[in-house]
Image: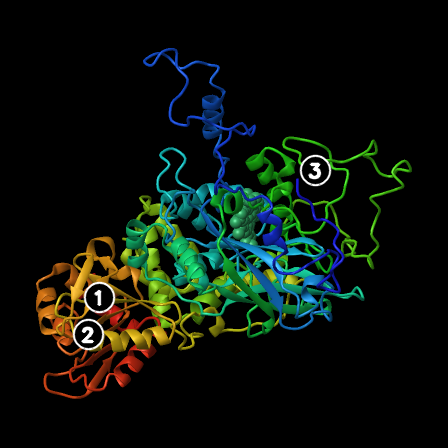
Amino acid sequence: MPENKDKKKKTNPNSNSPDFDENIKKKQMEEYHMDYKGQYMTTDQGVRVSDADNSLKAGERGPTIMEDFHFRERMTHFDHESIPERIVHARGSGAHGYFQPYESMSEYTKAKFLQDPKVKTPVFVRFSTVVGSRGSADTVRDARGFATKFYTEEGNYDLVGNNMAPFFIQDGMKFPDVVHALKPMADSEIPQASAAHDTFWDFASLVPEAAHMLMWVLSDRALPRSFRMMEGFGVHTFRWINEAGKARFVKFHWRPVLGTYSLVWDEAQKLAGKDPDWLRRDLWESIEMGDYPEFELCVQLVEEKDEHTFDFDLLDPTKIIPEELVPLKKVGKMVLNRNPDNFFAETEQVAFHPGNLVPGIDVTNDPLLQARLFSYLDTQLNRFGTPNFTEIPINKPVVPVSNFNGAGFMRQRIGKGKVNYFPNSLGGGDPKMASEKECGYVHYQEKIDGHKIRKRSKSFEDHFSQAILFWNSMSKTEQMHIVKALHFELGKVDSKEIRERMVNNILNNISHELAAKVAKGIGVEPPSGEAFSRVKDEVRSVKDKVVDAVTHGKTVKDSPALSMERSKKAGSIRSRKVAILIDNGFNHQELMSVKKALKDQGAQAKIISMFKGMLKSSDGQEVEVDKSHITTGSIMYDAIFIPGGKESVETMKKQGDVKHFINEAFKHCKAIAASGEGVDLVMESDIKGVKLAAMGTKELVNDAGVITLRDTSDLNAFSQAFVEAIGLHRHWMREEKMEVPA
Ligand code: HDE
C-alpha cells in the first residue's frame, strides 16, 4: 500500500508532514487510481481475461459450470456492491477543495491549519439532505448536511454541520425518536424524504424544544437554490484553545460567497420530478465549468467568563447566538475546485465524525454533541463492518499513522516486527507519546463537579424565545412562506388532534398571528388569545429560581441576520442560468447583445426552443438549441429573456409550453426580459399587473423585475437592468398575484 514516504522538501515550516500543500491529498489518492488506458482486463488476481461476454458452459446450450472463477468473481463483486446507506444524510454530494486562513488565528487557537495564511489545507465536503434515502430527490424540504473533512498536517479534523443553526432536540437520547418520526411511517414507508405526515407532526406537537428548529425547517432555508448558495453552521458550541492554554467558546459559520438564496416551494416540488439531481448536478457542473463554490469560515467567540451572560445556555443546541450579540469573525476561505473521481469510493465512503479533532479545537458538554461523539464511529462500523475504514483513501489522513490498533476486516497497514503493545522496550519504546509542544492532543481540562443525574438543566427550559426571534426577524414574504409551508405540512396530517395541538401548543406560543393564519388553512379553529405572554412568564419564573443559570442575560428582539431577504445584498449573477426563448426568425443582434452582457457577468445563457437542432435568425444566422421544452422548464433557470424577431415570436405565440414557461417564471418571481416583438409574447401570457413597454415607445420599462424594451437601437441599458434584476434573485411582490397560473 502506498504510504507517505519521507521526503526532504518541506513547503510548510509548521508542518508535521513532508511536502504538505493543498495537493497532498490529491497526490495520495492518485496512487490508488485504476488505470484502464491500454491495459488488458484482468481478474482481481491479475490474470488476463480472454472473454468477458460468455460464462463457461457445459456445451453451447448447457448449464454454467461452477469452476468458472471469472464469472463467480464478477457476480460476487456485483452482489456486494453496496454498503448500508447512512441512516440519516443518506443522499449526499461531495467535492474536494482547500481551506486557507485569511490571517493567523494564533491568538485564539493553536490548530496548525489556522496559523499561516500561506498554507492551503486540502478538504473534502459532503452536502446532504437528512431524511430521504440515497435515491431521493435533492430539492425536498429538509435541513442540509454540510460536513467538511480538513486533511490537516496534525491529522484529520471534521466539522460536521448543517445549513441550519439550531437543532430539533437538546439531548442525544431523543435522536432516534426525532429521526423515526421524520422518516417515512413505520407501517407503510410513506412518504419518502418529507416531514409532511402524521408521525412527524405528532412528535413535533409534543416536543416544544423543537419549536425553534421548526421555524428554520419551515422557512426558505430548507429549499436552497444551490449547495453553493447556502450557509453552514457547526450548531453546537465548541472550544478553541490557544498555545497558552486559554480557551474560548466558539460557534462555527460557513458563509457562501455568492450569497444565501432559496427556491420557492412550487419550484422545489416540480424540480424533484423534472430533475431529482438538481443540487448535485449544479455542484458538479459548476466545478466542471470552473465556477468554484466558495465559503468563508466565520466564528463567534465568547470568553469563558461570559458563559452565563446570555438569556439562553450556550450548551443548548436548540439555541443560536444572535449575530447582533456576538458578531462573526472571518477566519478564512474554502474553495471547492475538484469533483470526485468516483462517487462510491469518495462521497459514499467518506466517514465523518465530530470527534475527529486536532489540538486547539475541543468539544463542550452540549448533551447533543456528547451523544454524537458516540454515534458517528458506531454508525461507521455498521456501514463498513470494520474499524479499518480509516485506511481507505478518502478517510486516510495525509500524515503518517502509527499505533498498535489491532487487525480486523480489511486491515491494510502492515505492522512490522513482534512488538504490538505499549509500553515496550523491545521496540525501543516507539511509537512514542507527543507532548503538547510536539502537537500531542491534550483534552481541555474542564472542571466537572456534579451529581450523576438523568435530568436536564433548568437553563434549557425556554423553548420559545428564539423561535419567536426567528419569526419576528423574517420579512413579510418570508413569514408568508412559513405560513404556506405549514399549510402544506399540516395539510397532509390526517389527525385533527395533531393539527390542533400544533396550532395551540406550539405555534400560538410563537405568534398568535402565525397560529391564526395557519389554523385558517388547515381546518382548525384559530386560538382565541395569545399564549405567548403566559409562557414567557412561566419561563421567566422558572429561570429566576435557578441560581447559576442564565438569568438576566443579553438578548435581542430582532435579528436581521436570520432573514435571507433582509440581509440580502443585490449581488453577482455569476453562474446564474438564463433561458433564452426563441424560434426560427429570431433577432440575432438582440440575442447576441444580451447574451454577451450575461456572459460578461459570469452568467450562463441557454437557448430553449420547441425542438433541439439549429435555428435561423431573421438575417440568416444559425444558432444551436441547448434544450428543447420537453427536457427542460422555467424551474431550471434563474431568469428568462425573449428577444424579438417577428417570425420567432409569432411561432412561439402558438406554443403552450412557451406561455407556461413565462407564466411560471413570473409566478416564481424571476427576472424576465423581452426586447422588440418579444414584448408581444409576454403580453400573450397570463402575467398580470405589471407595466410593459407600450407600442411605439422608446422607453425601457422595468416593473417588478419584468424588463421590456420596444425600440432596441440601444440595448446596453436594457441588458444592465436585466443583470441587476437577476442579481436581486426574486421579485417577491409578484407572488400575491394569485390569478397567474404556474
Ligand atoms: Fe448527525 N449523524 N447526528 N447531526 N450528521 C450522521 O453519521 C447523529 C446532528 C450530520 O455527509 C450519521 O456517518 C446523532 C447534528 C451530518 O457523511 C449518524 C445526533 C448535526 C451528517 C449521526 C446527530 C448533524 C450526519 C449517519 C444527535 C449538525 C452527514 C451517517 C445526538 C451539527 C455526514 C453518519 C456525511 C450523519 C448521528 C445530530 C450533522 C447516525 C446521534 C446536530 C452533516 O452517526
Closer to us: 629 or 382:
629
Q: Residues within 10 Å of mark 1 (few under 14, many from 20)?
A: some
400 relative to 13, above or below: above
Q: Give the label, 2 or 3, closer to the camera.
A: 2
Kindly tell me whether residue 678 is visible in this rendering. Answer: yes
Q: Residues within 10 Å of mark 2 (few under 14, many from 20)?
A: some
Closer to us: 164 or 432:
432
Q: Give the label, 3 or 1, closer to the camera.
A: 1
Looking at the image, residue 625 sits to the left or right of residue 126; the answer is left
Spatial CA distance of label 2 from label 3 is 63 Å
For badge 3, the amino acid type reads Arg
Residue with the mark numbered 2: 588
Residue 161 picture quarter? bottom right
Spatial CA distance of label 1 from label 2 is 9 Å
For badge 2, the amino acid type reads His
Residue with the mark numbered 3: 413
- Placement of the N terminus among the 4 image quadrants: top right
For badge 1, the amino acid type reads Val
Q: Earlier in the sequence, mark 2 or mark 3?
A: 3
State the SS at label 2: helix
Q: Earlier in the sequence, mark 1 or mark 2?
A: 2
Residue 474 picture quarter? bottom left
Q: Residues within 10 Å of mark 3 (few under 14, many from 20)?
A: some
State the SS at label 1: strand
Seen from this angle, which residue lies furthest right? 425
Residue with the mark numbered 1: 623
How many numbered badges does the structure rendering display? 3
Looking at the image, residue 662 sits to the left or right of residue 564; the answer is left
Residue drawn at x 79%, y 64% as measured from the top left = 245
383 relative to 166, above or below: above
Disc marking residue 279: none
